[in-house]
Image: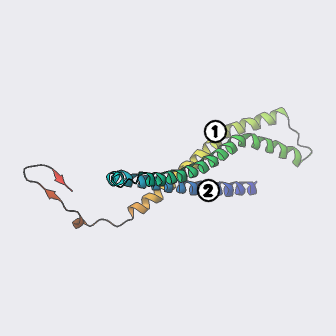
Amino acid sequence: MHFRIELKKITIFLFMKLVCVKQVAQMKSKDNRIKLMYELLNGIKVLKLYAWELAFKDKVSAIRESELNVLKKTAYLGAVSTFTWVCAPFLVALSTFTVYVLIDESNVLDAQKVFVSLALFNILRFPLNMLPMVISSIVQASVSLKRLQVFLSHEELQKDSVERNTMTGCKLSLA
């Protein structure tokens, strides 16, 4: 029993690590796409002036393709996870009954044992079905907190690096 619990912990830890890696890759590719689109929109006049539309179209397409590949891998991982968690209650019941019968010849399944066991498994079904969503939310929160920590740990801007001009007769300030 203890070995099974430890094995389950290791499996969940490895799965969380894999989800975390995919989440970081997804956010990096999204950042690259947003950065390029921001640059394109800010420099649209220059882009049109020099007729660079096709070159930048290829760049945007490459970044979108990269992001799409990461999203596909994440979706496959999610599908495997969902399939595993949907099958888990059935497999747990099947393996429990199989081990119970095979462990000792005097163990016999009767209706009372089966129904009580299935009732307990059904009680555990909802928490087990919620576990993947909780794991995913924890991973997303962890990745977001790390990104916020990096952003907030940057040096502060010096106050004299920004010039503030005030206009007389107007209650508007430009920074």
Query: Of helix, strand and loop, which one carries label 1?
Result: helix
- From the viewer's perspective, tell me whether residue 52 is left or right of residue 173: right
Q: Is residue 141 visible?
A: no
Would residue 77 appear left or right of 157 to someone viewing this image?
right
For the view shown, which residue lies furthest in the right direction? 105
30 relative position to 90: left or right = left
Q: Secondary structure at mark 2?
A: helix
Foreground pick, 6 / 52: 52
Residue 171 percent location from the top left of the image:
12, 49
Callout 1, which amino acid?
A: Phe
Residue at image location 40% in from the left, 61% down from the top: 151
**Residue in the foreground of this view, choosing between 92 and 64:** 64
Q: Nearer the viewer, mark 1 or mark 2?
A: 2
Residue pictured at 84% horizontal, 44% vertical: 98
Residue 11 appears anywhere in the view: yes
Q: Position of residue 36 (x, y in %)?
A: 42, 55
State the residue in front, 47 or 170: 47
Q: Which residue is mark 2?
A: 18
Answer few, some or many: residues within 10 Å of disc 1's Cα (few below 14, many 20 plus, some between 14 and 19).
few
Quarter of the rendering occupied by the C terminus = bottom left
Asked whether, in this view, residue 132 is left or right of residue 6, the answer is left
Above or below 126: residue 172: below
Cα gap from disc 1 to disc 2, whole angstroms: 24 Å
Identify the image's colour scheme: rainbow, by chain, secondary structure or one colour.
rainbow
x, y (%) of residue 133? Answer: 58, 45
What amino acid type is highlighted by mark number 2?
Leu
Image x and y of residue 124, in percent: 67, 40
The crowding category of the residue bearing disc 2, from other C-alpha atoms within 10 Å (few below 14, some 14 to 19, many at least 20), is some
Q: Which residue has dot 1 on it? A: 126
Q: Are marks 1 and 2 in contact (CB under 8 Å)?
A: no
- The answer to which of marks 1 and 2 sits earlier in the sequence is 2
Q: Quadrant of residue 14?
A: bottom right
